[in-house]
Amino acid sequence: MAAKTAMALRWVQDILDLYDAYDEIIRVSFSECQSMRQSIHDAFIEVINSNSRAPELLSLFMDDSLKNGLKRKGEQEIDHLLERSVLMFRFLQNKDAFEHYYKLHLAKRLLLGRSLSDDAEHSLVSKLKVECGSQFTLKLEGMFKDMQLSSDLANGFKESGAANADLDLSLSVLTPTYWPALAPPMSEEAKQEMQSVEPPPGILRTLVEEFTQYYNHHRSGRRLAWQYNMGNADIKLQFGTRTYELNVSTYQMFILSLFADIDDLSLTTTEIQQQTRIPIEVLTRQLQSLACAKYKILSKTPASRDVGPNDKFAFNNNFKSAQYRIRIPVVAAKASVETEKEKSESMAAIGLERQYVVEAAIVRIMKTRKQMVHEQLVTEAIKQLSARFLPTPKLIKESIGRLIDREYLQRSPDDPRLYNYLA
């Protein structure tokens, strides 16, 4: 997977380098000949869009640049990188697919604190806004706003004196309509069980309850739903005479807290699940990370990688490492090229979103024009939507059919090719 990701990043960089080379030739040898430049642009549009993964790869390239690629770069170099990335975005035909991936990558950068420069993040979104308008970047800007409001909320909570002084709490309160779904794929049953997860009794649960009360007092009328699957924590643990600082997921912190201050405690998978209410398929992966991977924070009986309901876990007092600070791997924490299954799921989500966008465009057109023949409506819809993606006549026809069924439109009784708008 790492090799595929490296090849994806290389593909985008090669495209940008090739464009820079042609740009230099046009500028120096052809005196900025506009017809030559347009020919080069047309060629790049064809080459880039011949790769069905181009939107994903460009978003992945921007993600890597904003996390790693800006190191040791000056302001002019950063601006050039962003300009060229936006230029390639301009060549994309399926800009809505890029938006799908960019929201996912941006959300992870913001929530995990992986971005190198807030200024670069805002600058890139501003450039995308110039290209496609405020509607395209509405949710991206909403994500930035949520992060700022979350910081203000967390500071207010600490200043209120309700926060435990022994814990350094960082919270992100997110507006669901702005943020993409970031949880790894799981069954519907597991999704329902996620809603019942809560911290084990103790200071963690008390902290959650106190912040919920604080939030409800200052944001009346809103409901706070805790998403523990996206959190992480830095905790200090003592193994014998040595102390280590571990970076773990929130679920892993819940599991480890069960063993705090109790010597020789042994718990089965079922007992851990009952106390944390973590869905079993999610709990299995968390326990494997803690007991079966490189860093064996917990000992497991029997000593196998598979986790069964009656397997026993205990705190591993014999754990040793040359590192003081240790990061326990979190599932799907690293951005990479999607598998074929993941790509299929993404395209299904993009396809569903396109249905809504096409239907909204048709309603807007018909509300203004009141009456149109089929061919004119298809042409006008393609014209309005081409800035985001190129809809097929078949997709538009299917959308018209759904709108007729829902009584937004009506076929003329005298001419089946003529549509009337129903107010």
Image (tube, helix red, strand yellow):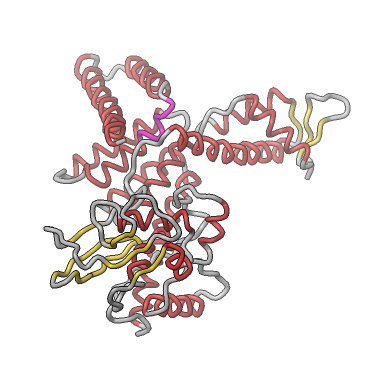
Q: How many marks?
A: 0
Residue 61 in the image: state x and y as whole percent: 31, 37
- Where, by quadrant of the figure, is residue 375 drawn? top right
Q: Compared to 22, does 103 lie above or below?
A: below
Judge by depth and name the residue closer to the eye, 203 or 54: 203
Q: Is residue 288 left or right of residue 30?
A: right
Judge by depth and name the residue closer to the eye, 306 or 393: 306
Q: Is residue 331 left or right of residue 394?
A: left
Residue most toward the bottom? Answer: 161
Q: Residue at x 21, y 68 (%)?
A: 317
Q: Compared to 10, does 169 lie above or below?
A: below
Question: Does the magenta-highlighted stretch encompass residue 33?
Answer: no
Q: Residue at x 32, y 46 (%)?
A: 334
Q: Residue at x 30, y 53 (%)?
A: 292
Instruction: Write the start and end of the magenta stretch as one range.
Output: 52-58
Q: Is residue 248 visible?
A: yes
Quadrant that contains the C terminus: top right
Q: Is residue 180 left or right of residue 297?
A: right
Quadrant that contains the N terminus: top left
Residue most toward the left? Answer: 322
Residue 237 in the image: state x and y as whole percent: 23, 70
Q: Compared to 16, does 357 lie above or below?
A: below
Residue most toward the right? Answer: 413
Residue 215 in the image: state x and y as whole percent: 47, 75
- Where, by quadrant of the figure, is residue 398 drawn? top right
Judge by depth and name the residue closer to the eye, 20 or 1: 1
Q: Main secondary structure of the magenta part?
A: helix
Residue 193 in the image: state x and y as whole percent: 54, 61
Judge by depth and name the residue closer to the eye, 290 or 178: 290
Q: Residue at x 42, y 21 (%)?
A: 50
